Each structure stands twice: as structure tokens, then as C-alpha cells.
Image (cartoon, helix red, strand yellow):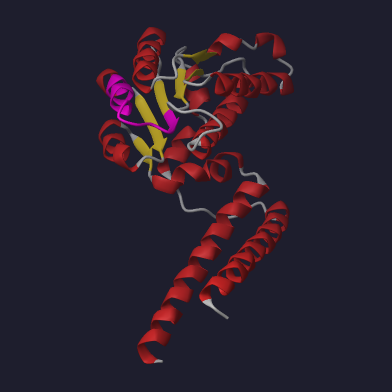
Amino acid sequence: MWPSQTEPIATLAIVVLALLLLGWFVLRARKTTGFPFRPIAAFQAMQGLLGRTAESGRKVHLSLGSSGLGDEQTAATSAGLTVLRSFAEQGAAFGYSPVVTVADPILMLVAQDILYHAYQRTGLAASYRSTDVRLISPDPAAYAVGAQEEINREQVAANVMTGHFGDEYLLLGEAGAQREITQLVGSNTVEVQPLMMATSDRALMGEELFAAGAYLARRPEHVASLHVQDVLRVLLVAAIVVAVAIKTFG
């Protein structure tokens, strides 16, 4: 076969393999409670964060980034929503929720829905406040300035930023760094990662952001997808080694 004819077959084989692996790992994750993960400090710090800050009477600010849903940064924004879901479940039991800032109106509605349902599941729907989710501006720079004001106005104890950020990240990161509050951040933007390391206590580097569902929610689907990615990486490396060996010695 010509290369152009084999490529669709190879792609289909990879997709089928990935689906089979995903199904197997989902079944295994549902039966197994102790799936091991390497420790990631930022996720460890997020677990129980709202309980720790509630004792001080101060708030946690959660930024979902300067992008929204339905664009090329949807995956990063969805990872931020996973963090929000974890925070909502942590705080709803005692009527405490983070201050959430967003740059997209659709994202605002989704974030409000997540908070409301967390309160509803604990029987405290009457304590839900839609104003805990605040739409700032779709412009990245304006969003950063507005979110910076929220950090200063609310006197927050921790600043968590997960999602897509550009150069405007420095305004938010610097606001938290100057006040010397706990900062936990994660972004898929490579250019921002040096700034994250300089201004935060714990940072999620690169694809670690997309593991939020597996680390915080421990849902079988998220856990399974993480293991499928690991298996596919191993197979890809093995295929490259074999191809190089065949090319070299064949």
C-alpha cells in the first residue's frame, strides 16, 4: 500500500485501541479504589483549601482564565471548571463558596450552575448566591484588572488561577504576590509558565492542568483517560525505537 492509503488505517487502529483501553480502564477504575498517582503539590494544596480558609473568615478567589467555552481554549477552561466543581463540593456543606471571576458570559452561567447544584446536593440551596460568580470583561487586560480589584476588595486568603492566560497573567499573579497570599496556578500557555513559577506557591506545569479531574474528583472516566494517555505514550516511544532500529539495521 502507498503511505497515503495506510495512514487512515493506522489512524483508525489507534482510535480503536484508545477506545478499548479507555473502556478497560474505566471498568478497572470502578472496581479499584487505590489507583496510584504521582503526587502533584498544587493538587494536594487544593484539596481541603476551602475548609482551611473558612476558619479565617476570608475568601478564596478562583479565576477561570481570560478565555471561555466554545473557542480553541475550551479544554483549559473545562479544566478550570473541574477545579471549581471540587471547590464547590468542599464548601457547600457549610455554606461557603469561592469568589469566582470569569471573562465569558456563557462560562459565568456554567459556573453558577455548578455552584448551585453543589448547594442543592447538600440541602442548602437557599444559601446559594449567584453573585459569587462575577463576569468581569471579555478583554484579557480588562479582565485581569477587574479580577485584581476583586482580590484586593474581598481580602482573599488564597488566589487560585486555572485556565488559559496570556500576558495579563502578570497583573493577577503580581496582585497575589504583593499581598503574600497563597497562590495556586495552572495554565496551558507555555509563555506564562515562567511567570507562574515566579509568582505562585504551587504551579501546574503543562498538561498537569488537564489531570484535574483525575486528581480532584477521582471519577473513573478521568482516571481512565489519564492511564490511556500513559499507555499510548509508551506505545509511541516503543514504535519510534523500533522504527529507528529497522531504519538503522534493516
Percent of width and height locating residue 246 = 42, 86
Q: Does the magenta-highlighted stretch encompass residue 162?
A: yes
Q: Residue at x 27, y 23 (%)?
A: 174
Percent of width and height locating residue 170 = 28, 26
Residue 233 seen: yes
* Residue 143 horizontal side relative to residue 194, left or right: right
User: What is the quadrant of the N terminus in the image?
Assistant: bottom right
Q: Residue at x 52, y 75 (%)?
A: 3
Q: Residue at x 57, y 16 (%)?
A: 96
Q: Which residues are magenta?
A: 161-176
* Residue 212 horizontal side relative to residue 159, left or right: right
User: What is the quadrant of the C terminus in the image?
Assistant: bottom left
Percent of width and height locating residue 95 = 61, 14
For this rendering, which residue is in front, 24 or 169? 169
Task: Classify 183 as above or below 125.
Answer: below
Residue 140 picture quarter: top left
Task: Classify 68 as above or below 232.
Answer: above
Q: Residue at x 27, y 39 (%)?
A: 194
